[in-house]
Image: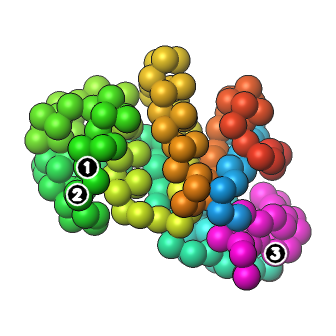
């Protein structure tokens, strides 16, 4: 893989062999890059992330990947309902840099002491991004990470993520083609 954080080679996958979502898909992701995965609902964008994470196996081809964190589209499904947000962050990451990222993501520390259902969708999505960043991945997999945020917060969050590019690479799923054009080095249409 040399300088690549993700290397997808000749990937073919489908839930049935006669209807493939991907046929001979290849791409790489390097440190400092954002690549956007754009496509219709049901085209296989989230399935691609499941393949990268190793939760699904390709029919053909290979996927090489370094340490990743994922931000899911639905933040409510990515947090356990009966534990505080802070407990769930501490379970998987160091909180040494917590205060720095709280300011950038416009989150109050007190919100982290609450249960997931006590936060708005936008607050919970930003908490999900916070957790993913604190895990210190080499790659962030972002599945519609700003879809639950209003336009101003969406822009602030994307700017804060872009600032992290010195250290990592990002693969972004989005339906928002304008967002993809604005932030991505390459758009992969599926």
Q: Is residue 69 left or right of residue 47?
A: left
Mark 3 or mark 2, which is nearer the start of the sequence? 3
Across and down, in percent, residue 118 comes to 17, 31
In the image: residue 165, left or right of residue 27 = left
Asked which quadrant contains residue 66, the reply is: bottom right
Q: Is residue 133 magenta?
A: no
At 54% from the left and 35% from the top, the residue drawn is: 158
Task: Give the image location of residue 184, x and y in percent.
Answer: 73, 42
Q: Answer few, some or many: residues within 10 Å of disc 1's Cα (few below 14, many 20 plus, some between 14 and 19).
A: some
**Tag nearer the camera, 2 or 3:** 2
Q: Which residue is labeled 3 in the image?
A: 9
The reply to whether the C-beta atoms of the residues labelled 1 and 2 are less than 8 Å apart is yes
Tell me the SS state at disc 3: strand
Other residues around mark 3 within 10 Å, as few (<14) / some (14–19) / many (≥20) = some
The span shown in magenta is 1-29
What residue is disc 2 on? 95
Give the Cα distance between marks 3 and 1: 37 Å
- Residue 98's tag is 1
Q: Position of residue 107 (x, y in %)?
A: 27, 32
Quarter of the image that includes the N terminus: bottom right
């Amino acid at each position: 893989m040399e300088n690549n954080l993700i290397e997808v080679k000749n990937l073919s996958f489908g839930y049935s062999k006669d209807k493939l979502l991907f046929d001979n898909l290849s791409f790489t992701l390097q440190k400092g890059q954002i690549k956007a995965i754009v496509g219709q609902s049901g085209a296989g964008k989230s399935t691609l992330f499941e393949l990268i994470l190793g939760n699904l196996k390709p029919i053909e081809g290979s996927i090489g990947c370094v340490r990743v964190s994922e931000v899911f589209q639905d933040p409510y499904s990515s947090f356990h309902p009966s534990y505080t947000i802070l407990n769930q962050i501490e379970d998987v990451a160091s909180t040494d840099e917590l205060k720095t990222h709280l300011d950038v993501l416009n989150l109050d520390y007190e919100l982290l002491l609450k249960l997931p259902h006590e936060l708005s969708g936008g607050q919970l999505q930003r908490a999900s991004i916070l957790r993913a960043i604190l895990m210190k991945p080499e790659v962030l997999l972002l599945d519609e990470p700003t879809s639950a945020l209003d336009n101003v917060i969406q822009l602030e969050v994307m700017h804060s993520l872009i600032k992290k590019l010195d250290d990592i690479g990002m693969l972004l799923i989005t339906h928002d083609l304008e967002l993809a054009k604005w932030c991505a080095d390459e758009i992969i249409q599926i």
